[in-house]
Image: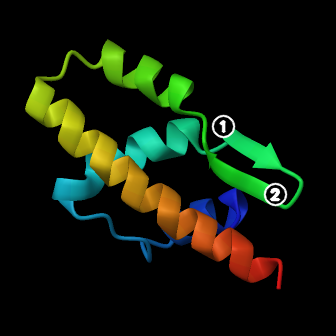
C-alpha cells in the first residue's frame, strides 16, 4: 500500500484503526520512510529514529516496551507486503 493509497483509504473512512492501536499507527506513519536498505530492498526500520521518537513521548517503561513491540508488528507486516510486491 503506497502513502497515496493509505491517504485515499483514510479519506474514504475505509481504513479504521482501533483506539488501542492508534498511537502505534501514528508513530509508524511518522517513521515509515526510515528503512534500512540492503541489496534486496528494505530490511528493517531504522531503530535510532524509532528510539528518538519513543524517548520524546515520556512513556513509562511498560508503555515504551508495548509501543516498541507494536511497531515491530507493523514493521514485520510492512516488510511482508514489500517483499510480496517484489516477487
Q: Which residue is found at the position 38% from the left and 60% from the top?
A: 73
Q: Which mark is residue 79?
A: none
Quarter of the figure that contains the N terminus: bottom right
- How far, Cα to Cα, is label 1 from label 2? 13 Å
Q: Residues within 10 Å of mark 2 (few under 14, many from 20)?
A: few
Q: Which residue is found at the position 21% from the left and 37% from the top?
A: 65
Q: Which residue is found at the position 66% from the left and 37% from the top?
A: 34
Tell me which label, 1 or 2, sits earlier in the chain.
1
Label 1 residue SS? loop
Task: Identify the residue at the far front of this view.
Answer: 39
Asked if residue 59 is positioned above or below residue 44 in the image, the reply reads above
Q: Are marks 1 and 2 in contact (CB under 8 Å)?
A: no
Label 2 residue SS? strand
Along the line of sight, the residue nearer the viewer: 29 or 37 = 37
State how many labels appear: 2
Q: Which colour scheme is used?
A: rainbow
Give the mark toward the camera: 1 or 2.
2
Q: Where is residue 46 in the image (x, y as percent from the top left)?
A: 60, 34
Q: Where is residue 53 in the image (x, y as percent from the top left)?
A: 42, 22
Quarter of the figure that contains the C terminus: bottom right
Q: Residues within 10 Å of mark 1 (few under 14, many from 20)?
A: some
Task: Identify the residue at the far bottom of this view.
Answer: 87
Question: In the image, 68: left or right of 18?
Answer: right
Q: Which residue is found at the position 17% from the left and 22% from the top?
A: 59
Question: In the image, 23: left or right of 40?
Answer: left
- The quadrant holding residue 63 is top left
Asked if residue 59 is positioned above or below residue 69 in the image, the reply reads above
Q: Position of residue 60 (x, y in %)?
A: 11, 23
Please name the residue that numbered disc 2 is placed on: 41
Question: In the image, 45: left or right of 67?
Answer: right
Please name the residue that numbered disc 1 is placed on: 34
Amino acid at each position: 500500500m503506497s502513502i497515496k493509497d493509505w491517504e485515499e483509504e483514510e479519506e474514504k473512512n475505509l481504513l479504521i484503526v482501533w483506539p488501542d492501536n492508534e498511537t502505534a499507527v501514528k508513530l509508524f506513519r511518522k517513521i515509515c520512510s526510515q528503512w534500512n536498505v540492503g541489496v534486496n530492498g528494505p530490511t528493517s526500520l531504522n531503530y535510532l529514529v524509532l528510539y528518538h521518537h519513543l524517548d520524546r513521548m515520556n512513556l513509562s517503561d511498560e508503555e515504551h516496551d508495548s509501543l516498541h513491540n507494536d511497531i515491530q508488528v507493523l514493521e514485520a507486516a510492512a516488510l511482508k507486503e514489500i517483499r510480496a510486491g517484489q516477487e
